[in-house]
Amino acid sequence: MSRRGNCLDNASMERFFTFLKTEGHYPYDIPTLDEAQKENYSIFSFLQRKRPPRK
């Protein structure tokens, strides 16, 4: 991080969590914390292992 109060320091993580909520949680009814954690794991494993690399 470059300095205190710079909004661009956190922009990449804010974008990721926005993606996680809109694509991974809002379309589904997830009643328990355990199911939410399983869904997060499946999303993370897809993003890290299964999707094609960006060009």
Image: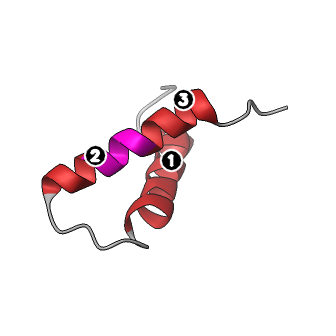
Residue range in magenta is 38-42
- First in residue order: circle 2 vs circle 1: 1
Tell me the CA gap for discs 2 and 1.
18 Å
Q: Is residue 33 left or right of residue 36?
A: left
Q: Is residue 41 left or right of residue 2?
A: left
- First in residue order: circle 3 vs circle 1: 1
Tell me the CA gap for discs 3 and 1.
13 Å
Residue sitting at x 35%, y 46%: 40
Check the image and tell me how it is coloured: secondary structure
Question: Of 50 and 40, which appears nearest the observer?
Answer: 50
Q: Name the disc covering residue 48, or none.
A: 3
Instruction: Nearest to the eye among marks 3 and 2: give it.
Output: 2
Q: Quadrant of residue 33?
A: bottom left
Q: Name the disc covering residue 55, or none.
A: none
Residue 16 rendering spot, x and y as whole percentages = 50, 47
Q: Quadrant of residue 28?
A: bottom left
- First in residue order: circle 3 vs circle 2: 2
Query: Secondary structure under badge 1?
Result: helix
Q: In the rendered structure, are the residues bearing label 3 and label 2 in contact, judged by CB atoms less than 8 Å apart? A: no
Q: Where does label 1 land, which residue?
A: 16
Instruction: Nearest to the eye among marks 2 and 1: give it.
Output: 2
Label 3, residues with CA under 10 Å away: few <14, some 14-19, many ≥20: few
Question: Of 31 and 4, which appears nearest the observer?
Answer: 31
* Residue type pointed to by label 2: Lys
Residue 13 rendering spot, x and y as whole percentages = 47, 42
Q: Name the disc covering residue 38, or none.
A: 2
Residue 26 sits above or below residue 17 on the image: below
Residue sitting at x 85%, y 31%: 55
Tell me the CA gap for discs 3 and 2.
15 Å
Residue sitting at x 74%, y 30%: 53
Classified by dominant secondary structure, the portion drawn in magenta counts as: helix
Residue 4 rendering spot, x and y as whole percentages = 41, 34
